[in-house]
Image: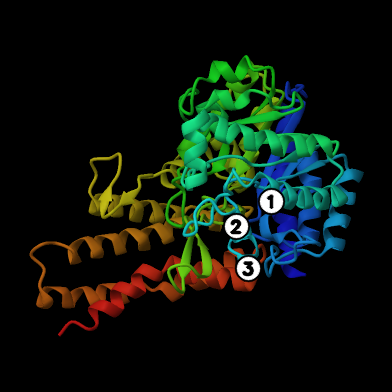
Amino acid sequence: MKRTVFLVMLLTSIFGYAKAFQNELNDPVSPFSVRGFHLDLRIQAIPMPALKKLASQLVEGGINTLVMEWEATYPFQEEPLIPNRFAYTREEVKDFIAYCNSIKLEVIPLQQSFGHVEYILRNPKYKDLREDQKDYSQVNPIREAEAKKLFTTLYKDLIATHNSPYIHIGGDETYLLGHSEESKKKIKAVGIGRLYGDYIKMLCEVVVGLGKRPVLWADIALKYPEALKGLPKETVFIDWNYGWDINMFGDHEKLMKSGFEVWGAPAIRSHPDNYFLTQWGKHFKNISDFVPLAKKLGYKGIIMTSWSTSGLYAPVFETTRDIVDLYAIRRVYPISGFNMLIAAFIESIKSEKALDAENFIYRYAKSQYGLDENDAKVFWKAVSAVPFEITQGKPIHTDLSIGQMLDSTRNAALTLGKLKPVKNAKEFEHYRLMAAIRVQYLTYQSIESRANAPEMDAEKLKPLIEELEALRTRELDKKFIAANSEVMYPSEIAQENELRSAKIRVLLDRLKRVK
């Protein structure tokens, strides 16, 4: 009950703020007939009462569509091996959809049907559908008959609980196209575009045959425009763009001339965001740049995506062919920490002008936290400090060293600690926690970098043990629990805390053996 009450309060503050901005903007009319928010439940399951409140506040903010990526939280009736331990009951789902209908919020179910289906193909029952027997992420498109049977069953189940005219079938990031010998033969005969397109055509026709309109991500169709041929005219493509050139996936003009309806999709959480990094500036720029472009291109809809993970999984193998479990690759800070970006998106789709991100941030800091103009600027500088990745011990896209990044992040964390929000203090605490987690991460990276230096020997490694032990992972774990226990299940939080500090424990245990 406490978790639900807190999330209700949290969401009320987010969308109440967005609603206030709507009045400031003289009640402009959005050019998007579909104004949507995408909810990713792959590693975040939210209690149903809180979901209802979220739905209500989305509607108040001007959102009319909710794309639900249920994944394994959906209680499939005829395929009971697919749901996971956090799956909702059918009664909960039906009641939620009925509630959304009553407040005029359309719920589009998203059922991945080509790539990103590890959670289905992990079960031996579906092993013959795998494109690769060591990477369970993708369906073999040659196995059309078996796939048609499975996904027809899943679509029918979703239709039994949802009444949207759309079914989102996924279709993105099919990295394994052509891996199986069967697929290789078809590519040799007709090309990789037709390998993708023929399978997608089959899925779309199933959806149309069930009286619905198929929706799919546009990246692979952009890459292989021949895949567009023969698709049902009812098909809708979502052009997801998180800050790159419009032609990154392929010739965008061909999609625009294809005659299909197109929606756009920016993101508030996406690569390379993870436990330790949120690229706030990138996401604000994505909203500022892409929403106006989507308007200019005449897109009928806009869907804000919010990815809790990359959608890729690392299998833990028991043998060379059998897995024990799947672990999500790249886990992101919970959505409870991203209220500011949600509010920015809501404002942007209503405004006739591109979002002025800097002005918006200062107004948000003043409205939500009671900060004056100077403190608002200090806040933004601290939150957006040194937003760079580290890969294999090396900072990416910057000349800064790990030590310099650590110094800047420590200063940012100290700055956030000194600021005194006069309201919504619990929301503000997320920024402090994110900064503290990043300081811990960069401290570890500094230790790991020194441990791997060529000149290090056993004697020189010993002092690093004390540094690792001083990282105080348990202290941060407690803060993470305090900040997020209302919006995540206890077992989810326990796993987050364990995985976030895993590298620290592994290196510490190894160094303790040094004599």
Is disc 1 in contact with disc 2, using a CB cutoff of under 8 Å?
Answer: yes
Which three-letter amino acid code belongs to the residue tagged 2?
A: Asp
Going by the image, does 280 lie left or right of 414? right
On screen, residue 113 above or below 494: above
- Of 135 and 51, which appears nearest the observer? 135
Which three-letter amino acid code belongs to the residue tagged 3?
A: Ser
Give percent across and percent down for residue 12: 74, 50
Total marks in image: 3
What residue is drawn where x is 62% and y is 25%? 228
Between label 3 and label 1, give the one nearer the viewer: 1
Whole-number angstrom distance, CA of label 1 to CA of label 2: 9 Å
Q: Residues within 10 Å of mark 1 (few under 14, many from 20)?
A: some
Return the disc, 2 or 3, that comes first in the chain's sequence: 2
- Of 493 and 262, which appears nearest the observer? 262
Is disc 2 in contact with disc 3, using a CB cutoff of under 8 Å?
Answer: no
Whole-number angstrom distance, CA of label 2 to CA of label 3: 40 Å
Residue 465 is at least partly visible in this image = yes
Q: Secondary structure at mark 3?
A: loop
The picture quadrant where one finds residue 471 is bottom left
Q: Residues within 10 Å of mark 2 (few under 14, many from 20)?
A: some
Give percent across and percent down for residue 399: 23, 40
On screen, residue 489 above or below 297: below
Q: Which residue is mark 3?
A: 485
Q: How is the image coloured?
A: rainbow
Work out which quarter of the rendered image holds the C terminus and state it: bottom left
Q: Which residue is mark 1?
A: 146
The picture quadrant where one finds residue 17 is top right
On screen, residue 29 above or below 452: above
Q: Secondary structure at mark 2?
A: helix
